[in-house]
Each structure stands twice: as structure tokens, then as C-alpha cells.
Image (cartoon, rainbow, N blue to C red):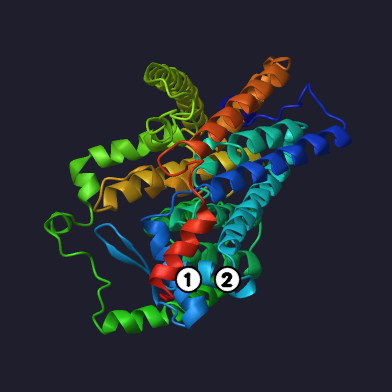
């Protein structure tokens, strides 16, 4: 049996649909601009509370008072996030432009940079093997950049920054697949270090790197690893000094926290199963309950019955889309597992690895990392705890879509347009009426009021 027969999900495919470069570029950049417009709508209508206030306090105290915190936001059970990066991503933009909008401009900018890194990776993966790069890039643009999963995270809290770390990690790993590079290894390890100062889910990236290194799918420059670890340790020095003085950085002392321990997820099993379900959901349209169930449609009419009908029509639409799409994603993951069966743990350096095969191996490494992380964690994860792997969960879907479009090329235009309309509709609804966003909310005024009351009281 040949490699192509055994690994059917990775066979070279010439797309039967090809767009002129001018048409492709127009569609691509219209999609990018549309995503930016929707992101800014979310950013300016976010409801500021909880994690946002923690970050605003640290950022404004640093920018206005010169009091840079040596540790990040408080997390559930496991204490404060190490390092001062969460304060700097708010405070440094404020030093450049003193406006509540400046941290949000910075957030949207680095998420755009992250998307462009993923796009560059996908362009090279599929251009190398076949002529389907245009369709696959547009598919990723739609399924990632315009996805409500992605845009719903356009608010000032730490998981929102993880997309950039995920992109830097995957992009640098791609450049390490054939040869060692000091710069790319340095960036690869720094991606993990940046994530460490943003959220405790950084371990996902570390485990993915270990799996790829074990498979010999990345070639590491060990001098660069040492330099990167040194830089990360140096950046964490203020945190360790503060921690050594027994500041309140340790795990919380409440009774519920004391019941938790490393390995809690593996012992109780359900957290591990739940984490895999989140992996499937990230690739599907089974969106968070905060996005679906907290929409009230009060703005539709003053008539209660009309609000009630709108709520239930909305929920039925979302649940039908969610269940049907998660089955499609499950199919994509089953095909990926079958295509990689007996391959992904081997260290045979002579085996033929195509770029699409490498992308599949990276996705499978992300699945394993998700399960391991859930098993080690002292908590049962919610969707935001694993959102870092969201873009990786799209890889199996992309690999399956290119096969479908080969067989049904005429479905491209209608399917793409239908998904675009659905995503724009959902994004506009939830940006105006959901748990975290409201058309009544003014991010700018909320920040001004909070800063005046908390940071610089009159």
C-alpha cells in the first residue's frame, strides 16, 4: 500500500476551482476588513467587569503611577498568573496613547498578526502540494477570522491574547520542521513563555512541542532553547522576588480549592472527556452558552411574547447548527485519526512527511496535549480555559474540506456565502445582546469611570 493510499486525508489535490489573483486578493482583504470591523464592534461594546477590571487596574497603575505589578490576574484555585505581562499589555499602549481604546487597538492588532501568521503557514502547506491554497486560505479566513468563537474573545481579558501565542508557536514549529534555526527556536520557546505570563493553559503549547520533538517533526537549536529559558526566567525575576516575600500569590485558601490537586482531572475522568468535547466544539458552531443562552432580544419589541419567540427561534437555530456541525467535526477528526493510525508516535526519520501530513500531526499533538492538560489540572475546564487550541481544532476541518471541494466544486460558492451570512448574523446579534456584550455598554465610559474611582480618585 502506497503512502498516498494509506494517508488519504493528505494526498495531493488539484483544486478544480481557481480564482484570478485579483479576485482572490479582493475577497481575502474584504474578509480581513470585515473581521476587523466586527472585532471593533465587540471591543467597544464589551461589559467591563471581573477579569477586565484586574487588567485595567494593573495597566493604569503602571502607566499613571509607575507601579508595575510583578504578577498577573488572580486565577481560580491555582493563584495569580506569574509575571507582569498582563499589566504591560494594557499599560504600555497607554504610554503610547492615553486612551481607553489603546489597549483594545493593541489587542486587535496582535490578533491580526496572529491570523496572518496562520495564513502564511496555510499558504505554504497547501501551495507546496497542490493548487488548493486559495480555497483553503479563504476557508480558514471564514472559519477562524470571522468565527463567533474567535470574535467573542475580543475583550480585555487574558485568554484573548493567547491566539497570538498559538500562532507564533505553530508558525515557528512549521519553520523548524526541516532544519534547525536559532531564531525560530528562540521564537518557539518564547511563545510558550509569553503564554505562561498570560494564562495557565500555556502547558498546552509546551506539551505540543515535546510531542513534535519526540516525533522529530521539529528540529531544535538547543542553544536557542537555553537563551529563551534565560530570558523567560529573567522576565519572571520580579515575580519570584515578590513570591519569596510570601505575598498572596499562592493558591487560594478557600475550602473548595483545598479539595483540588494536580491530577484531579485524570482521577475524576469527566474533566478529560469534557476537554475533548471542547476540542470538537472549537471546530464546530456549538458556541458558548454565554453567547447563545444569554441573548434576551429585549430590543426587538416591548411585547414579551415576541421577545420569547425570538429567544427560542434563536436558540433552536443555534443548537441545530451546533449539533450538525459538531458531527461534521467529529467525522473530520475520525478521518484524521485513521490517516495517522500507527504513525504519529513513531520516530522514523526516513518516513515521508508531506506538509499536509505535518499539519495533521500538529493537530493530533494538540488533541493529546488537551487531554493531558485536562488530566493534570486541578479544575474542570470551561471553554475559555482551552481556547488556546481553537485555531488548531480547525486543521482537521480544513483537511476534510479540501477533499469535499474536490468532489463537489460547485458547492464552494453557495456554502461559503451561507456560512458568511450566518457568521455575520450571529456576530452582530451577540455583539449587541449577550452575557459579555451589549448595545447599551460603552467600553470607553466604563473604563473612564473605573479609572477615576479606583486608580486616580478625585
The image's mark for residue 68 is none
- For the residues labelled 2 and 1, the Cα–Cα distance comes to 8 Å
In the foreground, 230 or 105: 105
Residue 350 seen = no
Which residue does the image show at 52% across and 72% down from the upper left? 91
Circle 2/circle 1 CB separation < 8 Å: yes
**In the rendered image, which residue does mark 1 sit on?**
59
Tell me if mark 2 has few (under 14), some (14-19) or many (20+) residues whose alpha carbon lies within 10 angstroms of its own.
Answer: many
The quadrant of the image that shows the C terminus is bottom left
Q: Where on the picture, by quarter, is residue 452? A: bottom left
Looking at the picture, how far across and down is residue 330, in whole percent? 45, 26
Tell me residue 216's x, y (percent).
54, 53
Residue 94 has which mark? Answer: 2
Residue 2 image offset from top left, x and y in percent: 62, 28
Tell me if I can see residue 388 in this picture. Answer: yes
Indicate the secondary structure of the residue bearing disc 1.
Answer: helix
Instruction: Count up the numbered dots.
Output: 2
Q: Where residue 154 sits in the image (x, y, percent)? A: 53, 49
Q: Is residue 410 above or below residue 299?
A: above
| Horizontal side, residue 267 vs residue 309: left or right | left
220 and 132: which one is in front? 132
Q: Quadrant of the N terminus?
A: top right
- Judged from the image, the secondary structure of the residue bearing numbered disc 2 is helix
Nearer to us in this view, 98 or 12:
98
Q: Picture quarter containing residue 262?
A: bottom left
Answer left or right for 55 relative to 145: left
Quadrant hosting residue 273: top left
The residue depicted at 28 percent of the width and 52 percent of the height is 376
Disc on the earlier residue, 2 or 1: 1
Amino acid at each position: 500500500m502506497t503512502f498516498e493510499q494509506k494517508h488519504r486525508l493528505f494526498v495531493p489535490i488539484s483544486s478544480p476551482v481557481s480564482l484570478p489573483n485579483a479576485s482572490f486578493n479582493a475577497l481575502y482583504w474584504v474578509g480581513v476588513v470585515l473581521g476587523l470591523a466586527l472585532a471593533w464592534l465587540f471591543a467597544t461594546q464589551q461589559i467591563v467587569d471581573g477579569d477586565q477590571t484586574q487588567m485595567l487596574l494593573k495597566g493604569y497603575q503602571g502607566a499613571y503611577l509607575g507601579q508595575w505589578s510583578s504578577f498577573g490576574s488572580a486565577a481560580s484555585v491555582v493563584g495569580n498568573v506569574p509575571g507582569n505581562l498582563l499589566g504591560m499589555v494594557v499599560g504600555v499602549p497607554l504610554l503610547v496613547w492615553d486612551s481607553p481604546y489603546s489597549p483594545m487597538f493593541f489587542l486587535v492588532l496582535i490578533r491580526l498578526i496572529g491570523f496572518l501568521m496562520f495564513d502564511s503557514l496555510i499558504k505554504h502547506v497547501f501551495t507546496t502540494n497542490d493548487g488548493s491554497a486559495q480555497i483553503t486560505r479563504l476557508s480558514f479566513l471564514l472559519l477562524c477570522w470571522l468565527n463567533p468563537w474567535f470574535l467573542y474573545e475580543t475583550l480585555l481579558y487574558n485568554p484573548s491574547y493567547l491566539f497570538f501565542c498559538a500562532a507564533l508557536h505553530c508558525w515557528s514549529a512549521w519553520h523548524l520542521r526541516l532544519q534547525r534555526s536559532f531564531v525560530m527556536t528562540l521564537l518557539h520557546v518564547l511563545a510558550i513563555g509569553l503564554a505562561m505570563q498570560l494564562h495557565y493553559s500555556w502547558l498546552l503549547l509546551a506539551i505540543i512541542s515535546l510531542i513534535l520533538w519526540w516525533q522529530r517533526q521539529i528540529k531544535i537549536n538547543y542553544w536557542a532553547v537555553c537563551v529563551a529559558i534565560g530570558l523567560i526566567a529573567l522576565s519572571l525575576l520580579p515575580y519570584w522576588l515578590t513570591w519569596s516575600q510570601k505575598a498572596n500569590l499562592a493558591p487560594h485558601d478557600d475550602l473548595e480549592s483545598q479539595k483540588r490537586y494536580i491530577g484531579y482531572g485524570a482521577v475524576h475522568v469527566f474533566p478529560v472527556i469534557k476537554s475533548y468535547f471542547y476540542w470538537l466544539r472549537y471546530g464546530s458552531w456549538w458556541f458558548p452558552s454565554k453567547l447563545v443562552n444569554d441573548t434576551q432580544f429585549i430590543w426587538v419589541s416591548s411585547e414579551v411574547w415576541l421577545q420569547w419567540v425570538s429567544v427560542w427561534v434563536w436558540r433552536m437555530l443555534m443548537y441545530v447548527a451546533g449539533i450538525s456541525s459538531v458531527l461534521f467535526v467529529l467525522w473530520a477528526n475520525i478521518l484524521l485519526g485513521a490517516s495517522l493510525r500507527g504513525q504519529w508516535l513513531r520516530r522514523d526519520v526516513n518516513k515521508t512527511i508531506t506538509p499536509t501530513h505535518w499539519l495533521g500531526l500538529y493537530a493530533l499533538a494538540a488533541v493529546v496535549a488537551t487531554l493531558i492538560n485536562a488530566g493534570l489540572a486541578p479544575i474542570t475546564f470551561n471553554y475559555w480555559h482551552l481556547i488556546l487550541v481553537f485555531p488548531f481544532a480547525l486543521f482537521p476541518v480544513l483537511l476534510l474540506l479540501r477533499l469535499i471541494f474536490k468532489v463537489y466544486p460547485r458547492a464552494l460558492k453557495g456554502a461559503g456565502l451561507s456560512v458568511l451570512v450566518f457568521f455575520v448574523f450571529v456576530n452582530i446579534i451577540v455583539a449587541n445582546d449577550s452575557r459579555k456584550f451589549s448595545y447599551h455598554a460603552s467600553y470607553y465610559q466604563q473604563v473612564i469611570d473605573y479609572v477615576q474611582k479606583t486608580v486616580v480618585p478625585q
